[in-house]
Image (cartoon, grey):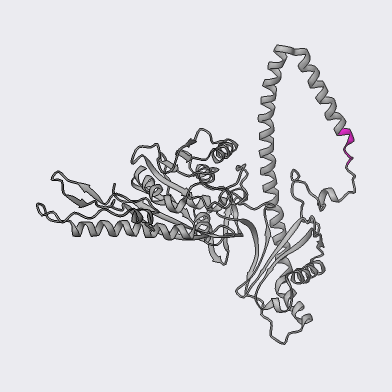
Amino acid sequence: MGEPETTGSLVKYYCTAGNGMERFLIAEVKKKLAAEDVCQIAGKVLFSSSVAINRVSELKAAERLFLLLRRDSPVHLSAHTGPAKAASVLQSRVLGDVAQWTGAAVTWSRLQGELSARRATGKEEEEEEGGSEEGREEESSRRTCGVEAQRLKRKRDEEEEEEEEQRPERKTGDTKDDHGTRPNRTKPEPSVLAPPTFRVSCKCTGPLTRYFSTQEVSRVIGGGLSRVLGWKVDLKNPQLEVNVSLSDDHLLLGFPLTRLPLANRSYMKTTGLRSTVAWALASMAHIQPGSRVLDPMCGVGSVLIEAAQEHEAVCFLGVDNDDGQLQRANENVAFAELPHRIQLLKASSMMLPLHSSSVDAVVCDLPFGRKFSTKTNMAANLPLILAEMERVLRVGGTLVLLLTPQLSCLLKRLLAQRDAGATCNQEAEPPTGKPRRPSPPPSSTEQQTDPILGGVKPPRTQETDSGLQYGAPPPRCSMEHQETLRVSLGAIDGLIHKYVKTDS
């Protein structure tokens, strides 16, 4: 990763993050943005950075990005404060220094200009590429059927001229073009030298809710901004949005810097796992250049695509046994322009067509069956799936899994049973030449109702040269647990398990 481009002056930001994602976001801003003054409050990470806004807006672990106006102590009101007094105190605390608001608005306008310039540059590059391609096609057409190609070109030019004539002319005194309430996506964001239009977005918890609803808080603050700063309220299409967060712990003010959340990936056609969580899974695998990374249940390819966006000199392989999911994954890989770096294969995660110890990292979101249905009985097949992941992973390699709380408990029990079984077998193994009494074969009922292995039970006896039977040792657990983290997936939580393979 190259040195980040800097602007020379520190800008204060904050980002929202899903529950459990704050630690990933903190690590990311420190690594990518050389961030200073990094701190965390509930669901948010605050930091300062001189890196260009284009790089800041590429954060992967963040949901939304804001320019930080002010962080202050919470608003406290006594139990006997009347509504009018409460409104006055609220306005006074939120508005604070008027110069701070106008300065923040100028900074916001500058950052919007930089983002708009980047979008315009990207669009021009796309048009140039498209123009070059169109020129090549036109030359080919001219060679084969020159008359027809020229006729079609003239027809397109005439249609474009007609469309241009039908567009309304810009009026000299029309201020909506310069500072209007409906700027389109292709135009630069409006300057804030003139009073901008705005609306207030408020999240309010704590004692204030005894006096005002969230809508009333927004109305009180909006009225104060209009009166003191001369800004105009526009609830439908404002130039500027003011984000206010009021709680028992803090007062936080900021301006959103992007219209869409950062978590909305422009390179994903069909979404699967939440993009921020998919990126977090890949980041925990510590992928290095030259690594081979496997997702044995890749679904639509979310984890692999997020990993490939971060790591270039890496080979990625996605496996899935569902034709529909593989089709979506292929479309996503093509849409992200990664077909030469991500290979997809139809196969079962319980019978991977790979050599043992052939991959450096296994990263997998085991299907929850909520967004896309799955035919696999995850609880019953988890032992086989885990065994295959362990088999293909090299010693020293990393295994990262995202599981439901139920599968997380099952995985812990499974690994604990295997580890305990290996220890007990070593202690109980008879000395050479003194075989113990053969163990009775298990009943059919016992084989079908094992709560950990889900009916798939390894053989408990093995034949020796002398014809005597000994208890077959269960496979020794070679996966060393590193950490388990809980992250929010929206309606439910997921648990990320990280393991390192210690021996084969």
Relative placement, left or right, of 255 versus 59 is right
Residue 272, visible in the rendered structure: yes
Residue 32, visible in the rendered structure: no
Relative placement, left or right, of 293 versus 395 is right
Quadrant of the image occupied by residue 270? top right
Q: Residue at x 68, y 29 (%)?
A: 130
- The magenta stretch is 164-169
Q: Is residue 46 magenta?
A: no
Residue 334's x, y, as percent? 58, 35
Q: Is residue 154 above or below residue 111?
A: above
Q: Residue at x 17, y 56 (%)?
A: 429
Quadrant of the image occupied by residue 93? bottom right
Q: Among all residues in the image, which is located at the extreme left?
A: 433
Quadrant of the image occupied by residue 107? bottom right
Q: Among all residues in the image, which is located at the extreme front?
A: 444
Relative placement, left or right, of 141 versus 381 is right
Residue 78's x, y, as percent? 69, 85
Residue 186's x, y, as percent? 74, 43
